[in-house]
Amino acid sequence: MPPASFARRATQLSSVMPTSAPADSIAFDSGHAFPGLLPDLTSEAGNALSEFRAETLQYAPRPGLPELRAWIADHMRADGASLNASNVLVTNGAKHALELVCRLMIDEGDAVVVTLPTYFSAIPIIRSFGATFVEVPQDANGMDVDALATVLDRAAAAGRAPKFIYNVPDFHNPTGVTMPFERRRALVELARRYGVLLVEDSPYRKVRFEGDSVPSLKSLDAEGSAVIQLGTFSKLLAPGLRVGWAAGAPDLLARMAQLKTDAGSCPLTQRVILEFCRAGRLDAHTTRVQETYRAHRDRMVRAFERQLPEVSFQTPNGGYYLWLSLPPGVDGDALARRAADAGVIVIAGSRFFANGGGDQRGRFIRVAFSHAGLDEIDEGVRRLAAAYHSLGTGAAAGAAAN
Amino acid sequence: MPPASFARRATQLSSVMPTSAPADSIAFDSGHAFPGLLPDLTSEAGNALSEFRAETLQYAPRPGLPELRAWIADHMRADGASLNASNVLVTNGAKHALELVCRLMIDEGDAVVVTLPTYFSAIPIIRSFGATFVEVPQDANGMDVDALATVLDRAAAAGRAPKFIYNVPDFHNPTGVTMPFERRRALVELARRYGVLLVEDSPYRKVRFEGDSVPSLKSLDAEGSAVIQLGTFSKLLAPGLRVGWAAGAPDLLARMAQLKTDAGSCPLTQRVILEFCRAGRLDAHTTRVQETYRAHRDRMVRAFERQLPEVSFQTPNGGYYLWLSLPPGVDGDALARRAADAGVIVIAGSRFFANGGGDQRGRFIRVAFSHAGLDEIDEGVRRLAAAYHSLGTGAAAGAAAN
């Protein structure tokens, strides 16, 4: 008979498994890159496997290749954060960095603060370590810092401070909201004052379509120990490389590195990235990424305005997603299922609520404009609109019957 | 102030950090490959990044590339185990597979059975999940199954079965011992009878220098749910690729896959491996690995016989290591420190005992013959002999004074 933990942990995580759907389905669900944006890395890989073979085919230092750590620190310094290589830990993607934060910090029953809603892949990772969630609402400017202050005050009074605050300040996943400067400053100040680690997850920071970049939470962390930023090359370059990082206080990163059981992240992919960046290709690539996804966003926004004006959304200035608000009586879970039948995969909003979502649970779906091409975007929205209309006005009732 | 778990987990793992030593030191400590054996993978990587670009630069399926899972199943079937792709989960190296087993199975305070001594990198991984260790002695034939039966009997009577039994049956790390057939059969039967998962960690299985291969524990697991085997391409091909696997019951692997927070292991390195294996290069490479490390082992054995006959060891038929038994009065920790000063890095035997080692703690050191070249092996043993003799007959006392 399997142990208790076996069934419990499995159940907690089952919601992240992919949906199965018709073969010609259009993927509005995933954070995959647009295939036309995948760069040619053959030359970089050739160098990495010849000139650097003794490095790329042996075990790598557990904190990452020193040169890549230095490059990431430079990259973040150019973005306003005061860092050097000792502030950078290379990980197998940003989610791995979040897992390491959880492994280090969480004991069964600890609380973690997240936004309502929050990134759906973060939920099972945090929960699998036995944490409970305290949700803080957000508005058009992101996490409500007054509500957060109340939460932290109450927790401090009870002697049970949360282990960390998890937030996506740039092009929030799923809502697309970007926190303005004053809100960020207040957030960092709260974290510092209450001594609660602030985890800034910012994979889409460079995927900005218009407007100026807002200082990162990490750049506002004057003492350097209040914020740990999670970054990734998945959205900068290509998801398949599986290289991300955590940037924070060296003592915290050293303890996370000790918990890495990968015997060092893959040195081959780290070196391929270094070769790409050092060849000066990243800036031009980032511009292409921004231009391409801006066009995707615009196409999708227009398609929804034309084909499905019943849903509403705030147009994001960057990132990969629209967070669609559904009219009363239409259930997001039902719409997601009907859409899959109609050949377009979307993610029900219910999956983005750490504690179930209450009366917000059925009111949203998330659609990605990153992976599908322009014509596919039109066709996908057309299918989604058809699915929507097929639900009729009794959408919510239809959902319950499914 | 950091939470309790913070300091505790960090302390537990500090022993796996690398030693610092003079720049021209000879590495007898690591499981790195001999640099001359690192294969040329430029052509495989070129294909992977052009023909397979849409696969290798996007997120991969969480259980691994289906073709690689099928290839690994074929590879293990050829080794006597009854498997198909559904029995294989691709991981970021074998240690990552062990971590996933731990994450799934262990609750704080659970017991795990290991050999005395055991693989030193497994100790902090298992301990970091809050497990305690039950050590079972081993002899020249590996884990003592009679002693194990007593342990399992007692645990069953107390209603506290261990969560799993961890063992390295082929060229055990660190002792080099290979379990004979009858002992293996008895071990699998015990695991099955008591319903305790048996974790077979066998990275060196193909690194055999002479004699016939003994059936794997997994191949003796008739029902398929008693044993999970951990494998890796690190010792077959190159450590830097960071691709390993777990082979076991599909329901167990599905739950482990749900706990993978890497968004799928790197598809680029998986495809490079597939291209290498499908080009038929693995067999010839394995032969080169076996011949090279056999020569390394022979050279090191002769060097110790000539230069340091005071230590004794059982010559292993494969693997990467000699486990040196020291005469009374010579302390392994002291010798390892003195050796580092003398420019040869070895690992003190004390690190291989999950519960400290008691009176065995100071009696061994582990030396690897894998990474150093033939001349370096001679020079390294010469340095180690000099360090040994510099300790004098009062070695143990000298250690205490250090």
Image (spheres, coloured by chain):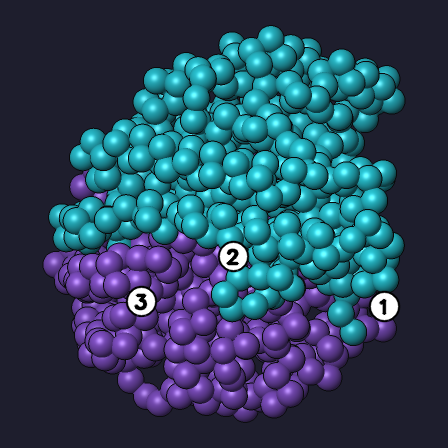
Chain colours: A cyan, B purple
Residue B212: % across, % down: 35, 90
Camera-nearest label, 2 or 1: 2
Q: Quick check: can you spot residue A88?
A: no
- B323 relative position to B119: left or right: left
User: Tag on residue A26?
Assistant: 2
Identify which residue, B318 or A211, lies in the foreground: A211
Circles 3 and 1 on the same subunit: yes
Residue located at (41% from left, 83% from top): B74
Residue A352: % across, % down: 69, 42
Q: Amino acid at mark 2?
A: Ile
Q: Identify the residue position indicated by label 1 in the image.
A: B158
Q: Secondary structure at mark 2?
A: strand
Q: Amino acid at mark 1?
A: Ala
Task: Give the mark nearer the N terminus: 3 vs 1.
Answer: 1
Chain under callout 3: B
Q: Secondary structure at mark 3?
A: helix
Alpha carbon distance from label 3 to label 1? 47 Å
Chain under callout 2: A
Q: Secondary structure at mark 1?
A: loop
